[in-house]
Structures are given as structure tokens and as C-alpha cells.
Amino acid sequence: MSRTTTLLASAAMLASTLTLAAGTTNGASAAKGWDRQAPADKAETSSTGARRLKCRARISDRTPEQYSNVFVKVRTAKRARVHTVAKYKTTKTHKFRRANRKGRARIKYYISGASPGYRVHVNVTVKKRGKTRHCSTSFKPHR
């Protein structure tokens, strides 16, 4: 056997091995698919899967007047569950929402007669697919 024949035989064996591994009948298709990612790998590295769950919160008015409304604005992952807890001087108020398709949630709090000058801390928890993140904001009511 000449050297060329030996190389061709080795190439044919390699092509048939690739064909069996890829599950195709055409060796050229198997060789072309060699550098492609498997579908499972693509799902893990998609743009939504690769992003980390984030939590960003801000209040619409840092010094609101008593008996008015403030909004807690949350930025997170799309359709994440959002739980807020406003801790007033003598009570706590829990609110639950789901973020929209853009990852935004807007939670309304009516301040009522909250103690003027006492800082109200709002703790935010977001959850999605078993992951949890926390963030917070606050406001200080006045008369």
C-alpha cells in the first residue's frame, strides 16, 4: 500500500466514526456538525439563561407627605415574583406582585398617617427559578 492509500483509508475510517457518533448517514454532514453546539448546550447559554437574577429598587418620593401614595419601582428578571415589606414604626405591610415582560414591577403604598420623620425601610425580595435576590429602598414621611 502506498502512503496516499493509507491516508485515504485513515480518513475513511475517521469519517465513518464521525458518522456513527453523529448518527447521520453522510460523513460530510457529520464532519460539518463537529464544531456545532448540541441543543442542550444552546439552552444553557441562551441570553435569558446566562443572565443573573438581579434586584434593583427605588422609591418614587423619598420624602412624601402623610396621607399620600408612594411607589416602589423594582427592576428584575421578566416575570419574576416580587415581595415587598414596608417596615413602619409600629407595623409592617407586605405586598406581592409579578414583574412584567420587561422585568418591571410597580408597587403602590398608601402612607396614611405614618410617623413623620421616621424612616420607613422597604425590603424587596425577588424570586425566579429557585433563585432569590434582595434589595431595599426607604422613604421618610413628613407632615
Image (cartoon, rainbow, N blue to C red):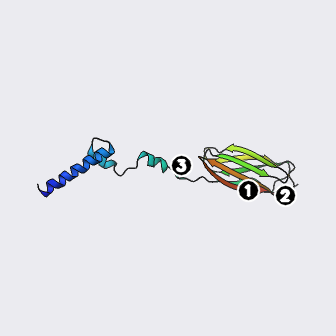
Taking the image as shown, residue 1 lies to the left or right of residue 51, namely left
For the view shown, which residue lies furthest in the top direction?
A: 25
Q: Position of residue 19 (x, y in %)?
A: 29, 45
Q: Position of residue 13 (x, y in %)?
A: 23, 49
Residue that label 3 marks: 48
The amino acid type of the residue labelled 1 equals Thr
Question: Is mark 1 in CB contact (under 8 Å) with mark 2?
Answer: no
Tell me what residue is drawn at x 82 percent, y 52 percent. Answer: 88
Taking the image as shown, residue 61 lies to the left or right of residue 37, namely right
Q: Position of residue 75 (x, y in %)?
A: 65, 51
Residue that label 1 marks: 137
Q: Position of residue 22 (x, y in %)?
A: 33, 45
Tell me what residue is drawn at x 18 percent, y 52 percent. Answer: 8
Of residues 85 and 119, the one nearer the viewer is 85
Question: How much space separates mark 2 and mark 3, taking CA atoms?
Answer: 40 Å
Label 1 SS: strand
Question: How much space separates mark 1 and mark 2, taking CA atoms?
Answer: 14 Å
Question: How much space separates mark 3 and mark 1, taking CA atoms?
Answer: 26 Å
Question: Is mark 3 in CB contact (under 8 Å) with mark 1?
Answer: no
Please tell me which of labels 1 and 2 falls first in the chain: 2
Please tell me which of labels 3 and 1 falls first in the chain: 3
Residue that label 2 marks: 118
Quarter of the image where one finds residue 140: bottom right
The numbered mark at residue 60 is: none
Of residues 139 and 61, the one nearer the viewer is 139
Taking the image as shown, residue 128 lies to the left or right of residue 119, namely left
Taking the image as shown, residue 139 lies to the left or right of residue 44, namely right
The amino acid type of the residue labelled 3 equals Thr
The amino acid type of the residue labelled 2 equals Tyr
